[in-house]
Image: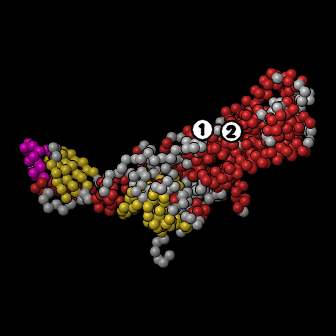
Amino acid sequence: MNGEAMATVEVDELVKVYAGGTRAVDGVSFAVDEGEFFGFLGPNGAGKTTTIRILATLLRPTSGRARVAGLDVGADPGAIRARIGFAMQAVAIDPLATGRESLELAGRLHRVPGAELRQRVDELLELMALADVAGRYAGTYSGGMRRRLDLASALVHRPAVLFLDEPTEGLDPQSRSALWAELRRIREAGTTMFLTTHYMEEADELCDRIAIIDRGRIVVSGTPGELKRSVGADTVELRLVGESGDGVVHAQESVARRLEGFPPLTSLERTETGVRLALVEAGSAIPELFRRLDGDGVMIRGLSMSEPTLADVFLRYTGHEIRAEEADQPIELGWWG
Amino acid sequence: MTTLAWFGLDAFYLGRRTIRRFYRVPANPVGIVLYPLIQLVVFSQLYKDIVQLPGFGGGSYLAYLAPGQIAFTAFFAVAWSGSALLSDYRIGYLDKLRIAPISRYAILAGELVPLFVECVVMAGIILILSVLLGAPIATGLLGGIGVALLGGAFGVAWAGTSFVPALVTKNEQATGTLAMLFFPVAFMSTAFVPAALMPEWLQVVNAWNPISHVIEAMRSLMTVGLEWDVLGRAVAAILLLGFVLHAVTLWAFRRLTA
């Protein structure tokens, strides 16, 4: 419309204040384009889950506006529900239903017609590698299988927007990368994806664009590359041996001399075994780095490289470390709790 | 399709899950039948001669005892019925249902309607066992169906004592606090002795005891015949009990899913 790409999710000055007075979301605005993979990155308690629950029509905002698939969350929750899928942080599966039954129920409640439903369920079971256990109670499934079943049940009705709240929380690394591959496939099929995570690696791996959220506010947003570049340089550590046996000190001097005026280099620090370099976009600077160091006097015994972490990005934009988790979960004690 | 048809269909699919959840744990149906059956067999022997007291009007004590045990069966079938919804709430399954494009009341109907089926079947089993043990069934097969249906309706109404604390407290342990009310209320009813043998004050209480009215109607169908006034009082008691308890259930459910 108007020649512009329509935003699938549009959030404007969203505020959520809980009954106890907690401002979980404090004036958040952003937009997610159709087909985009967008991520909310932030620590526990930052307001990620509250925002995603508002967008999924489970919570009402205190003020502000939120639209999903062109519909207002307050005015049209029913129509939004037909168009979204939501994989929640805690995997919610019925332990006494089989995998197939769970997916069929999800499909029925989303009005998927019978003939199409059978085909769709088979397809999803195959896709999520659950076909072999489709007839067993979901209570017998492993953690990874539960996640995949939960995700499958959010996909039965082919939602236009998929919400994922910490989708790989508690998964082992192997299951995690398998799930990432799955999410990429879903996205390639044209689904708009909205993800929350506190794993930098996850946001980096999956998202086109991320917003860092802290204490209910978006502090910065951009592509993962932009955010990391904005933090500054990657760290490259070189372990050195001196070629002529003069020891590390000679080699360190050699490196320092040869890297004088090397544009990506922002700092050089001597370590016990070699040097620690701060390089902007180290990944693409390393070939040139090696060309400069090639020659007499420098022998590289080892190299390690690390990108800025969530901690670095977070610290840069919020001015504080990711704070410790808080004991603020609700507990129900009964009649007078 | 109309909204109402969708509602019915959604409640059906959700109800099917509720039924499966019930019978896939064999301890559910077995436990529900076992306790009333033990009472029926043991008490009918233990208090065999109690029927010689004035007020019983003859017959066997088994015949007197059976209707109360059928009502007990319905109670056992619903005693913890609210905890399933609470568990769904806890694990986030209720949220998952809430973001489906269905009426949230279909979720509640999907819990309550199957209880009726469960209670009818469980009460029916105890009824059949009672008859096999020698209890009369004056109104025959149709009357027997009526007894089971009364058990089902009473069960659904009484289920409010489990749903209300479950939804209000959202605590598993607190869910049982009202259900146990059944025991004093049942033992004050005419399940074991007729009203004529009660002290005067208890007779007054008994006149307002919904369980007594349900048991009296079952007893009338089993030992006397079709007495519309007795049956009517039971239906009225069930409706009143169900209305009061489930008005609170509805309020608590709305609050939980707001």
Residue B146, position as x, y percentages in the image? 85, 42
Q: What residue span does the magenta drawing correspond to?
A: A240-255
Q: Amino acid at mark 2?
A: Ala
Residue A122, visible in the rendered structure: no
Mark 2 Cα-neighbour bin, 10 Å: few <14, some 14–19, many ≥20: many
Q: Amino acid at mark 1?
A: Gln
**Res. B210 image quadrant:** top right
Placement of B38 over or under B22, stated as above or below: above
The residue positioned 85% from the left and 45% from the top of the image is: B233
Q: Are marks 1 and 2 on the same chain?
A: yes
Mark 1 Cα-neighbour bin, 10 Å: few <14, some 14–19, many ≥20: few
Q: Nearer the viewer, residue A125 or A153?
A: A153
Q: Nearer the viewer, residue B187 or B16?
A: B187
Residue at the limit of the structure toward the bottom, as seen here: A2
Q: Which mark is residue A208?
A: none
Q: Which mark is residue B179?
A: 2
Q: Nearer the viewer, residue A335 or B202?
A: B202
A260 sits to left or right of B22: left
**Mark 1 or 2 closer to N-term?**
1
Q: Are marks 1 and 2 in contact (CB under 8 Å)?
A: no
Q: Secondary structure at mark 2?
A: helix
Tell me, yes or no, whether the highlighted magenta stretch contains residue A254: yes
Q: Which mark is residue B173?
A: 1
Residue A16, position as x, y percentages in the image? 48, 60
- Label 1 to label 2: alpha-carbon separation: 11 Å
**Res. B102 image quadrant:** bottom right
Which corner quadrant holds the N terminus of chain B? bottom right
